[in-house]
Image: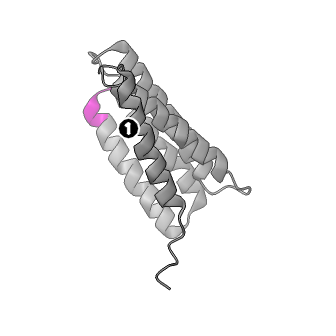
Amino acid sequence: MNKAILTAGMIVCTLLHMKAEYGNIVILIHIFKPLSVICVLAMAVLVKQPESAKYKNLVVGGLFLSLVGDSFLMPWPENMFIFGLASFLLAHVVYIVAFMSGTKLLTAKWTFVPMLVFGSIIFYISSVPFNFLE
């Protein structure tokens, strides 16, 4: 399957998914939301000369976990939000590993400390209630 066909398929599926969301047509949401991600996943799988096999496999794994997360976040009779959130968390961890796989940024131990401090500050800021303006 060629890249142009998959790109066109992704665009069409995404537009149909948006139309289904706008019209609240649940059956079409369940069809076109995953299909758009499957097109992107297929494009990643079909890459002929990846940067490295590890990088390609990690990106494909991240896209698969994103597909699972999207599926959990679709309208279901029961609330699957936590499972969708966990899937996206794992997907982002896999993406980080993939994007860092060709670098030496994290090989030095001193780089971990500033990243931990920065992450802690962001976590703290995001957990502070913003009702002080009231």
Position of residue 4 measured from the top left corner of the image (x, y, whole percent): 25, 35
- For residue 32, side relative to residue 80 (left or right): left
Is 57 one of the magenta-colored residues? no
Q: Is residue 47 left or right of residue 112?
A: left
Residue position for label 1? 114
Per the image, label 1 sits on a secondary structure element best described as: helix
Any part of residue 45 in sight: no
Quadrant of the drawing holding the N terminus: top left
Q: In the rendered view, would you say 14 is above or below 50?
A: below
**Residue 2 colored in magenta in the image:** yes
Q: Is residue 19 visible?
A: yes
Residue sitting at x 63%, y 57%: 75
Q: Nearer the viewer, residue 75 or 131?
A: 131
Q: Residue at x 39, y 16 (%)?
A: 54
Residue 55 at x, y = what percent? Answer: 36, 20
Q: Residue furthest bottom?
A: 134
Give how far across and how far down residue 126 sits, in percent.
49, 59
Region of the chain picked out in magenta, as a range: 1-5
Instruction: Tell me: residue 10, above or below residue 133.
Output: above
Q: Is residue 111 above or below residue 75?
A: above
- Residue type pointed to by label 1: Pro
The percent position of residue 134, horizontal first and vertical second, equals 50, 86
* In the image, residue 108 above or below residue 68: above
Dominant secondary structure (helix, strand or loop) of the stretch shown in magenta? helix
